[in-house]
Amino acid sequence: MSSSSVAAVSPGAAAQVSNISLQNFLQILSTQLTNQDPLKPLDDQEFLAQIAQFSTLEQSAALNATVNQMFTVQSVAQTVGLIGRTVTVSPATSTGTPFIGQVTAINQVSGQVELTVSNSGSSSSAGSSESGIPLSRISSIQTGGN
């Protein structure tokens, strides 16, 4: 194998190598196969070890995607309990004012849960609804009665 195409990996760099992506692994494997010495081909055990690493990397990526989906579903499931509840919504900016309203809908946008809250306060925006409110802006939830 040409030493200029694939750098040697020191034991201290093991943590960095474990974070390579699927595309990076395929690129390294194809470079290694392209530049190997035809008179000294890769032995079977080393090749099988690399294929096993590839399989493990692929399974880890699939597991990561599944866990992310589970977190999204869990977040939506927990938020469903807010429908019909009265909440205090913090202002979006430092100059805004908080308002109190009832959660009327839940949406999922780009993997994030957003609420629609009908404003029930006495301000000029009473009776209107604001959508796209992230959970981080909910400062309190009224208990009892709802």
Image: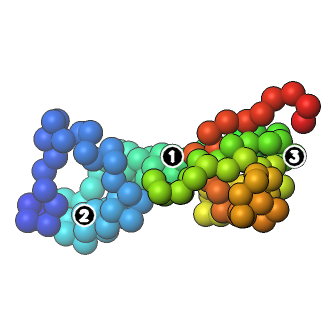
> Which mark is drawn over residue 60?
1
Callout 3 crowding tier (Cα within 10 Å): few <14, some 14–19, many ≥20: some
Furthest-bottom residue in this view: 34
| SS for callout 1 | helix
Furthest-right residue in this view: 145
Rendering coords of residue 146 (x, y %): 90, 36
Q: Are marks 1 and 2 in contact (CB under 8 Å)?
A: no
Q: Quadrant of the N terminus?
A: bottom left
Q: Disc 2 to disc 3, how far (Cα)? A: 60 Å
Q: Is residue 27 above or below residue 92?
A: below
Q: Disc 3 to disc 1, how far (Cα)? A: 39 Å
Q: Nearer the viewer, mark 1 or mark 2?
A: 1
Q: Please tell me which residue is depicted at 62% across the width and 53% down the height of the picture.
A: 134
Furthest-left residue in this view: 4
Give the amino acid at mark 1: Ser
Among numbered discs 1 and 2, the one appearing first in the sequence: 2
Q: Which residue is mark 2?
A: 32
Rendering coords of residue 41 (x, y %): 24, 60
